[in-house]
Amino acid sequence: MGILEQSFALVFEPYTLLVILLAACFGMFVGCIPGLSATMATALLVPITFFMEPVPAIAVIVTATAMIIFAGDIPAALLRMPGTPASAAYVEETFRMTKSGRADDALGAALVFSAIGGIFGSLVLMSVAPTLADIALRFSSDEYFWLVLLGLSCAVFVSPGSPAKGFISLLIGLFVATIGMGNPAGVPRFTFGNVELMGGISLIPAMVGLFAVSEVLRSVVTKAPSLETAQNVRGGIFRTQWHNLNVYPVQAVRGSVVGTLIGALPGAGADIAAWISYAISKRFSKNREKFGTGHVEGVVEAGAANNSAVSGAWIPALVFGIPGDSITAIVIGVLYVKGLNPGPTIFINDPASVYAIFITFIVANLIMLPLGWLAIRCAKPLLSVPRNVLMPTILIFCIVGAFAINNTVFGVSIMLVFGILGFWMEENDIPVAPAILGLVLGPMLEQNFISTMIKHDGQILGFFERPIAAGLGVVTIIVWFFPLILMALSRARGDESRAP
Amino acid sequence: MIKLSDLHLGVLTALLSAALLFYSWNFASIPGQAYGAGTLPRLLGYAGILLGCIMILQGLAGGREQWRAHMAEWVRSPRSVAGVVSIVGVIVFYILFSAVLGFVPTAVIVMLIPMLILRVNPLLAIAVAVVMAFVVRYAFGQLLLVPLPRSPFLPILG
């Protein structure tokens, strides 16, 4: 049997299809509940995936996240409350469409163009990842060091809020990654005599804390949404989509391309992709004045962007082991547990599983159409689930999930500490994503930095000796000084305009 | 929860980074090399001190407002504070007592207390907490074989 046949066999076996269906239903439910994010859902799914074969385990996460990003549009359109941050960019647009009696058009566009964006991103992932992996096979510690540093730098500068706060978050993540004995000298660091800390901070309890427990804490200090405007959508949601596709083909393609590229950028996920695509759509639209009044054009472009970003984020995650967003940061942990160690060699060691993951992306985005239709038709009961019942229930799943990683309550303690930390960070406008990337990439950064230093006898210029490493190094340094370059340019422009 | 200004965050970052630098100063190196366990933590310490100083300077330029720390809006609502305390409290309770009480009784308490504080109808809260405790026990304990703590005096409840 060829590799592709093996991959199809892995995906289209009844068990995998069943878990894909269940994950899709779970994703639809989570996306419909404002306050539950795709990252939180992924963190909650991880303990369950531990008990599955590699392909179904990854299929669960792929399917659930694709669904959640679309389903976040449902409360956004009906309640003006984005189910996930990825729907926030065009919430005003979809809500105004609902108010003017076009909820079916708004949600239909969100659904169909999410699926188009998701499939586009998956096709790019399928075609680009193996080629990139071929190139990455020639990488040594020099290239990996710069690649990791570039990823971390991007995470700081593209995260919401000030770069200084993004940098604080990154330092927190990198510091946590140094805890334990996994370091070049193999000595205990920051363990304070605690035996359980010798192995380092487990990634999954930390993620469950940062994303799920902090979300539970946030939910008890924010008001529940009012369901006054919620209504069941009666019209045919697909009726107007052929027309939208004919009128806005450029927007659909542009949103998908921009979304995939932004998704592939470490630290930038679906939410940033949606904001940027919405801005691009407005900038190049012939009907710019209609934006914000219930115009579907921005929904088409940003809706395609946020779902294509989900697939795009997997490109650096699979090829280099560098997460494209916080969801793939968690996924990398799952891949390691499942023996599918991310990196270029995964395409040589286990190509059938990799192609099975690719096929899962396509399947997930296709079943999004019927399930999305169902979720839209049943929107009101889904939105009515009381948060004060739901959140304590989620808490017990968090506790069991954190416990199940090492079967000790130490995991629950880690979860609690990181839950409080995540809550404090969000309260102080410190983005969480750079901390996650620091936590995941810290060991890789340290290992490649020390190896390269030893290799070049401590000569910093040695980091630029190999051509690709030099290119990556220069790009990284440009990213560091990008805000200063922008500031200097805008000042120069200001001087020019003041000149007589 | 106190919301810190850039000035406060700068001071906090600089102090913690200085502590990190101090603590990691004597970490062992790889034998025969100048680099080792302390290299990355020391670099993080230097970077943190530099960042802290930049934030302090930015904060000082921001005027008197930067000296004030603000309480978060939700701290004024007793129910929100009780909600946060209850969530943290029940997790601590689970850490301390799950091994003694067993999973099901602890899980019921973990769900029930926040629900009651968040004003869920008591009967509904009890029903949801009990049913979910058994569902989670069955799903994770029986199907996924997670060794959830068993109660020595309530063997049936597990």
Image (cartoon, rainbow, N blue to C red):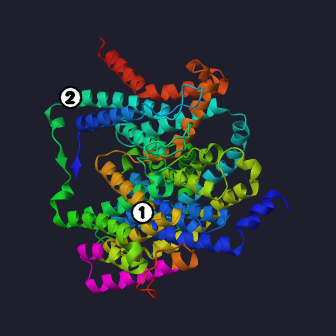
Tag 1, which chain?
Answer: A
Tag 2, which chain?
Answer: B
Quadrant location, the C terminus of chain A: top left
Tell me if residue B128 is in the magenta stretch: yes
Q: Which mark is residue A412?
A: 1
Residue A64 located left or right of residue B86: right
Q: Which mark is residue B60?
A: 2
Q: Position of residue B58 (x, y in %)?
A: 26, 29
Look at the magenta stretch and give its main secondary structure: helix
Are tags 2 and 1 found on a single chain? no
Q: Give, as a single range, the part of the protein colored magenta.
A: B113-138
**Amino acid under label 1?**
Val
Q: Residues within 10 Å of mark 1 (few under 14, many from 20)?
A: many
Q: Position of residue B84 (x, y in %)?
A: 26, 63
Which residue sits at x=35%, y=15%? Answer: A496
Q: Quadrant of residue A238?
A: bottom right
Relative height, residue A281 to residue B122 (above, below) = above
Helix, strand or loop status at disc 2: helix
Q: Which mark is residue A94?
A: none
Relative height, residue B1 to residue A478 (above, below) = below
Out of A85 and A73, give the one closest to the viewer: A85
Residue A222 in view? no
